[in-house]
């Protein structure tokens, strides 16, 4: 069964009213329970003080007699005991007890001389929370006591105990609860009348609001579905939900496009500045903030004359560009990073006249342009030089091969050459082969190389290189000690080129120890962005004069070295955006540290 809008509103208002009335009634009733207990405490306190005062007067009138006999014979005290119970609505009994707890005077004489059970203190009811206090008051009858100590000659003499029954305390609470329920019934009746009146007032504009929201979404009324009469709230909620979804989608799309645009323009090396129709600053990219020395948050919305300090060399160009709506390739020198750099300034009007959206100002760093042009020219020259040297090397290699072939033919044709001829032929062959190795290394060095990047486990690569060299060098007394830190990340590198680097470094370390020794290899992490490979040997070391030249092409201290190995190592490490560092103490060994980026 479908419930109409008016019925829904009436039920909602009545339900809300019921909740409010119930909450206030419960709060009021909780307060009443506290007031009832406080009233009982106050009555008990008043009666106990009256009894205390009368007992002190009786004892003062007969100081030499037995105190309890004096009190038992005192008629006024006995009358006060009885009248306290008769006239105090919450008091059940009143008694005076000696220090042992025996009843000496009681509002009911038949109970004198006994040892009554000790009841719970009335103050405990005040410390309970409202729900627990309500549960105690409406539980089966319980008796609580309020007590006041008696003193004689400043010494404990007994106590006055007043019993309060929960039945007596809850009588007034029940009457108040009945009055509260009657008031709640009246409030619900009034709420029902108010709900009907409000429903008539609200119902009429709801359909108009729904139609306006549909028009805002540009949806025809017939396209929104066949909602029946009485579904006004449902229709309005549906329209609002669809409108909210459309707004959220548009907002996310705008934020995404804005973030993407911000990222793109911040990555530009050129400085971009946007001004609005009123020549107020709208946007700066990161490069423009660096050039102007300001942040977008600090200057957004400011006029062009307030953007720069008076006398700033860029100010007249900006003023001219905004006034004329355009500026082409004007140059200006601006301070940046402690130096003065030249910029090319251009201004472009955004949008068509007569109402352009604003003006964009572009600043290009002329030094960067010149540097780029110089690098392009230098790269072209290096490429041409590489092709030339590669061609020359090939042209030299071919005659060398022919010379080597003819040397071997001469050896075969000379049946019994003299010792001098044989020695000369051997020297010629050796030198041809050495020159061929030099040419091969040179071609490898000048030939352009492309990195075949992929995931590389540096620790595994080092272990494989050590395993490859160990059988050959352990026989001559070389020991390998490998230390690898746990949980090292994978790096992105060219596996084969890094293997070539490792084998070259380890081979040099082994060759530096002709009498044997230890090669210590350590792989660990240096900071959050780099891995560190350390190779230490116990060899002959490198002289300080030679240490500065070890990466120079063709420089070597070995009798049969080509001087290309360490140059290739240096080049490969640089190609991986890494660094290599060598330290050595002659006679004590050499340490090579290679650092490679993670990622």
Image (cartoon, helix red, strand yellow):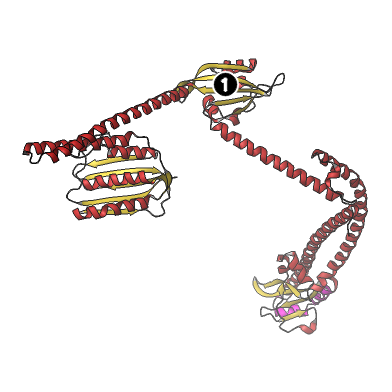
Between 212 and 90, the one nearer to me in the picture: 212
Viewed as shown, does residue 166 lie left or right of 228?
left
10 Å crowding of disc 1: few (<14), some (14-19), many (20+): some
Q: Is 81 part of what is drawn in magenta?
A: yes
Q: Which residue is the site of mark 1?
A: 308
- Tell me the residue at 62%/17% (across/down): 326
441 lies above or below 358: below
Dividing the picture into quadrants, the one containing residue 356 is top right
Q: Quadrant of residue 400?
A: top left
| Relative image position of residue 182 (x, y in whole percent) | 90, 62
The magenta region covers: 62-85
Image position of 294 with respect to 7: above or below: above
Residue 88 visible in the shown view: no
Q: Tell me the chief SS of the magenta region.
A: helix
Residue 434: % across, % down: 21, 37
Residue 361 locus on image (x, y percent): 59, 22
Residue 544 belongs to the span the image colors magenta:
no
Q: Nearer the viewer, residue 62 or 502?
A: 502
């Amino acid at each position: 069964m479908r419930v109409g809008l008016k019925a829904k509103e009436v039920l909602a208002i009545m339900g809300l009213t019921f909740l409010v009335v119930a909450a206030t009634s419960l709060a009021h009733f909780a307060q009443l329970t506290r007031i009832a207990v406080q009233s009982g405490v106050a009555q008990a306190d008043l009666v106990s003080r009256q009894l205390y005062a009368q007992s002190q007067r009786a004892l003062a009138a007969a100081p030499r007699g037995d105190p309890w006999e004096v009190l038992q014979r005192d008629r006024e005290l006995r009358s006060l005991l009885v009248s306290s119970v008769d006239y105090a609505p919450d008091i059940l009994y009143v008694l005076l007890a000696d220090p042992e707890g025996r009843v000496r005077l009681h509002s009911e004489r038949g109970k004198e001389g006994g040892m009554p059970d000790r009841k719970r203190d009335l103050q405990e009811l005040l410390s309970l929370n409202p729900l627990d206090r309500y549960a105690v008051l409406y539980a089966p009858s319980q008796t609580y006591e309020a007590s006041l100590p008696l003193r004689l000659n400043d010494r404990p003499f007994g106590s006055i105990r007043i019993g309060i029954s929960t039945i007596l305390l809850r009588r007034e609470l029940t009457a108040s609860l009945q009055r509260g329920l009657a008031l709640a019934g009246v409030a619900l009746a009034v709420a029902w009348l108010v709900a009907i009146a409000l429903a008539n007032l609200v119902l009429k504009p709801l359909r108009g609001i729904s139609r306006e929201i549909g028009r805002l979404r540009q949806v025809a009324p017939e396209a929104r579905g066949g909602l029946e009469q009485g579904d006004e709230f449902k229709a309005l909620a549906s329209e609002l939900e669809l409108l909210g979804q459309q707004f959220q989608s548009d907002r996310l799309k705008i934020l995404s496009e804005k973030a993407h645009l911000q990222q793109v323009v911040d990555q530009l090396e050129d400085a971009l500045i946007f001004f609005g129709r009123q020549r107020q600053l709208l946007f700066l990219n990161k490069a423009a903030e660096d050039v102007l020395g300001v942040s977008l948050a600090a200057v957004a919305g400011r006029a062009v004359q307030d953007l720069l300090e008076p006398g700033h060399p860029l100010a007249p160009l900006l003023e001219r560009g905004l006034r004329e709506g355009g500026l082409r390739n004007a140059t200006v020198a601006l301070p940046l990073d402690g130096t003065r750099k030249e910029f090319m300034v251009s201004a472009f009007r955004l949008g068509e006249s007569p109402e352009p959206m604003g003006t964009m100002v572009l600043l290009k760093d002329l030094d960067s342009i010149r540097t780029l042009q110089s690098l392009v020219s230098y790269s072209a020259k290096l490429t041409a030089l590489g092709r030339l040297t590669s061609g020359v090397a090939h042209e030299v290699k071919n005659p060398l091969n022919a010379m080597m072939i003819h040397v071997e033919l001469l050896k075969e044709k000379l049946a019994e050459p003299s010792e001098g001829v044989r020695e000369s032929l051997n020297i010629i062959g050796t030198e041809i082969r050495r020159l061929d190795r030099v040419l091969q290394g040179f071609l490898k060095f000048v030939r352009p190389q492309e990195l075949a990047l992929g995931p590389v486990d540096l620790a595994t690569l080092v272990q494989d290189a050590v395993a490859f060299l160990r059988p050959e060098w352990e026989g001559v007394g070389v020991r390998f000690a490998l230390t690898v830190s746990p949980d090292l990340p994978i790096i992105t590198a060219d596996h084969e080129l890094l293997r070539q680097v490792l084998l070259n470094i380890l081979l040099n370390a082994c060759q530096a120890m002709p009498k044997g020794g230890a090669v210590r290899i350590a792989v660990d992490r240096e900071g959050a962005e780099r891995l560190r490979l350390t190779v230490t040997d116990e060899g002959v070391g490198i002289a300080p004069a030679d240490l500065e030249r070890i990466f120079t092409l063709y420089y070597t201290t070995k009798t049969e070295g080509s001087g290309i190995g360490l140059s290739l190592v240096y080049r490969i490490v640089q190609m991986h955006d890494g660094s290599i560092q060598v330290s050595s103490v002659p006679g004590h060994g050499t340490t090579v540290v290679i650092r490679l980026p993670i990622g």
